[in-house]
Image (spheres, rainbow, N blue to C red):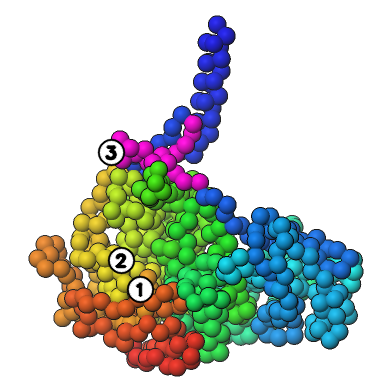
Amino acid sequence: MNKILFSAIALVFATTAMAQLPKIPAAYSNLGYDTNGRLYFKDKDEKYFAEEFKNPLTTEQLLGKPKGTENGVQMDFGTLKGTVTYGLIPYGKVPHPLPGYRKTVKIEDGKIELNIKEDFKYPYDFVDWKKNGYLNLGYRIADEQGMLLFDGIIALKGEGPFEVIPAIYEGPFVNMLTDNSAVIWCKTTHPVKAEIEINGKVYKDEHETTLHRWNIAGLTPNTKHNYKVKYGIQSQSYHLKTAPSKGSREAFVFGYASDSRHATGGGERKILGANAYIMKKMAALAHMKDVRFMQFTGDMINGYLSSKEQQRLEYSNWKKSIEPFWHYMPFYIGMGNHEALGLIFKDENGKQQAFIDAFPYETQSAEALFAEEFVNPENGPDSEDDNKYDPDPKNIDFPSYKENVFYYTYGNVAIIVLNSNYWYAPSIANQTASSGGLHGYLMDNQLQWLRETISKLERDKNIDHIFLTQHTPAFPNGGHSKDVMWYSGNNEKRPYIGGKPVDKGIIERRDEYLDILINQSKKVVGMLTGDEHNYNWLKLTADMPIYPENYPHKKLNVSRPIYQINNGAAGAPYYGQEVLPWSKHTQSFSVENALCLFYVEGKKITMKVFNPDTLNQIDEVELR
């Protein structure tokens, strides 16, 4: 009787535990939970379990839990081994404040203790911390091999004993800039009620928080506006410049690049996740050239992780690399394949068998983390739910498009940002049993939203030029001929939903996309792409070969030319040129680091391309 009762109780507990596990979206296939609640992927009667990411680094860990001491500050990084280099940050004294590094200490048993009194006494107190009664200390963590892991900030008040106070460790950033509004946001190390003052108006946080966002309205067009962010006893002051009035056709410059994941060469070229060396130079050059906004479309970071918190850390490193310039001008960010965050299933030997977007989508997907870490317009489609393939219309089966598909306008230009790595399953090109999104594929609801958005912008008398941007080229030229929108000419590649392939293959879908840009629009100038770590451009014309031999499907009518401008040269390891059907049409191929600048003067657009490392001009093309 006791055994029966025990078994019954155990069954109740097991059933309750299983009920609390995240529901597997019906859009996936061959996934399940075992009796211990472990998620598995099943292929040919073999079960492969989702890996647990071991010892992920987190932003919280590397913020170091600082505590003030009589002489300075103590920090605790847990089990981390390595070094910390640190120095004072001259807020208010220079337009782009960065730490003046002075000393390096070894992390002992996960901890360090810094002597502020001794290290920054006269004549090394160049920020006047004794006079002001507070200071900001920038620190840089490297692991035992010397790879840089994180740039952090500590704020302290007093002259000893010292007290830790809130610091801004990300931002403030300017985003969603219009002719009369903007969003300014930042993150602080500790919860605080912060506020921003701009144009004589004050916007305040409603409660103490570490994420601060202010929606600024009522600004004057094409005007420099000073703003001051106040947090605790500190403040930082910068400025922004609003967009020109709608319909004004005033001249301006915008920039484009992609692919800045970390590279070889050491130092800032490989701060965990990002090539901060090139990105900092990229942002500095853009600022010097009076760029009004930057579009960056994908592969900011190394990514491809199953740890949300380590991916968040990589995003933080990327943001910090351009932070001194993001204070003044907006960066609009799109997703790439290296932003993949998912569930990775491996066999007993550690070989990957499947990799899919993580769920629950609302909190764990690549799209959800992207929306948490960046601020973009929210005018895109909802998701791929309710498309004709949706296997469970009553439940959520796909992640959100919120802030990863959107459009914005500036002056007489519209930029449409697409996600060609939506619901991305990195293994799907070769392993379809799990179902998932394909690298380079624009899914049905997104494409329908694009049609509607293009139609709306075609009718907008204030818009003369439209640019599309997605991470993957329609026509690869070097490094990705085996995937993107080509797959070596194999149209069979496509997403799988609920275990079934969608109707249209990758080349058919590429042509549907291009048909919208060419034949349903007169304003589209071209596509801004990346993924391939090089710079080049081509002009798609009716005589350019774009199909594999004996292609059986309907072919695209190229009624007018458009450009593909590829710039994946923001610091990721370079890719050389390949020979492809359209190679004779490919122009200016370069593996130099590159920043594309678009000079818009009414109906005219000229593109100039510069190497941000050496400052030489790579190219100049009159687009319109």
Seen from this angle, which residue lies furthest top? 1
Which residue corresponds to the image point at 68% horizontal and 85% vertical from the top-left?
95
Residue type for callout 2: Val
Residue 394 visible at all: no
Please provide percent x and percent y for residue 43: 31, 40
Seen from this angle, which residue lies furthest left? 550
Which residue corresponds to the image point at 44% horizontal and 68% vertical from the top-left?
298
Q: For the residues carrying marks 3 and 2, which lies nearer the camera in this image?
A: 3
Q: Which mark is residue 484?
A: 2
Residue 228 is drawn in which quadrant?
Answer: bottom right
Instruction: Give the CA separation, mark 2 to mark 1.
Output: 10 Å
Which residue bears the numbered disc 1? 532
Residue type for callout 1: Glu
Q: Which mark is residue 44?
A: 3
State yes or no: discs 2 and 1 in contact (Cβ < 8 Å). Answer: yes
Name the foreground residue: 13 vs 193.
Answer: 13
Characterize the local packing of mark 2: few (<14), some (14-19) or many (20 or more) Cα atoms within 10 angstroms.
many
Q: Which quadrant holds the C terminus?
A: bottom left
